Image (cartoon, rainbow, N blue to C red):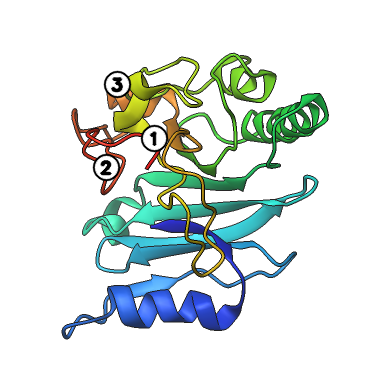
């Protein structure tokens, strides 16, 4: 589970202790909290299934992109010394419409894709977060699908998502129409800002991990509401 716009370490800890390790559970852990702005990222994982091997940051402006490397707790790891690696990139790209913001987002994703192209080819990559893109035609978004590390949209849903009711089922922002609680953006649900993109091997299962058809979901959104 990854999250952005975490303002403090106390907030990151609160997710772990009040949402995950509850009702007797104690098997969830968090990556180290790294504060590089007033809006930071966090990653949480099930320690029964995964081990966090490393974490670093891909330096971009105005916010860095967090890179987490996890591996599966294969019961035969001590015998064969082999496991499945998952690399997660948590993005919170530059917000706002207009050409200058689009250029900044494009610069961020270009840096990220250059970085991913240096990683081992047998890793399963998940690029996720708040992309702040309004359309699949935006250069920042197109960068994800080009070059040696090109990614895949698991639900293959390109389009002009902004303020377009035909994409209501995949809209994630904003869940508030008028009231503004706890730093939440208002304006109604009318954008596909939050997404998860994956490397092609995740779709094919060629590196011991495979996308489960139908498992991609805009949580809490049944597609029946638009701009509300």
Give the vertical position of 3 relative to 144 (above or below). Answer: below
Q: CA distance from mark 3 to mark 1?
A: 26 Å
Q: Residue at x 65, y 57 (%)?
A: 56
User: Percent x, y for residue 117?
Assistant: 64, 28
Neighbor class of circle 2 (other Cα within 10 Å; few <14, some 14-19, many 20+) is: some
> Where is residue 201 shown, x and y percent of the image?
38, 25
Label 3: few (<14), some or many (≥20) within 10 Å?
few
Residue at (25, 67) in percent of width and height: 48
| Residue at figure coordinates x 73%, y 36% from the top left | 108
Mark toward the viewer: 3 or 1: 1
Residue 97 in the figure: left or right of residue 14: right
Q: Residue at x 43, y 53 (%)?
A: 176
Q: How many marks?
A: 3
Whether residue 206 is visible here, answered yes or no, is: no
Circle number at residue 171: 1
Q: Secondary structure at mark 3?
A: helix
Q: Residue 204 shows which numbered tag?
A: 3
Quadrant of the snapshot with the C terminus: top left
Q: For the residues marked 2 and 3, what is the alpha-carbon distance in whole angstroms?
A: 27 Å
For marks 3 and 1, the one nearer the N-term is 1
Q: Is residue 26 above or below residue 74?
A: below
Residue 142 vs residue 226, the one in the foreground: 226
Tag 1 and tag 2, C-beta contact below 8 Å: yes
- 10 Å crowding of disc 1: few (<14), some (14-19), many (20+): many
Mark 2 or mark 3: name the one nearer the start of the chain: 3
Q: CA distance from mark 1 to mark 2?
A: 8 Å
Residue occupied by mark 2: 221
């Amino acid at each position: 589970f990854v999250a952005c716009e975490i303002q403090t370490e106390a907030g990151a800890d609160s997710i772990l202790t009040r949402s995950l390790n509850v009702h007797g559970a104690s098997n969830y852990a968090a990556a180290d909290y790294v504060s590089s702005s007033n809006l930071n990222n966090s990653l949480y994982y099930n320690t029964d299934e995964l081990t966090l091997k490393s974490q670093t940051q891909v330096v971009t402006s105005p916010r860095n992109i967090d890179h987490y490397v996890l591996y599966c707790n294969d019961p035969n790891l001590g015998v064969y010394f082999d496991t499945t690696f998952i690399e997660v990139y948590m993005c919170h790209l530059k917000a706002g419409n207009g050409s200058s913001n689009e250029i900044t987002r494009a610069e961020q994703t270009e840096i990220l894709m250059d970085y991913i192209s240096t990683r081992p080819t047998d890793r399963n990559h998940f690029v996720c977060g708040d992309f702040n893109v309004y359309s699949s035609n935006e250069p920042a978004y197109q960068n994800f699908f080009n070059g040696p590390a090109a990614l895949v949209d698991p639900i293959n849903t390109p389009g002009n998502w902004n303020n377009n009711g035909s994409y209501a089922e995949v809209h994630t922002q904003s869940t508030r129409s008028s009231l503004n609680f706890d730093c939440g953006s208002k304006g109604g649900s009318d954008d596909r800002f939050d997404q998860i993109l994956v490397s092609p091997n995740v779709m094919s299962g060629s590196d011991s991990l495979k996308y489960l058809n139908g498992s991609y979901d805009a949580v809490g959104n049944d597609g029946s509401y638009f701009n509300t």
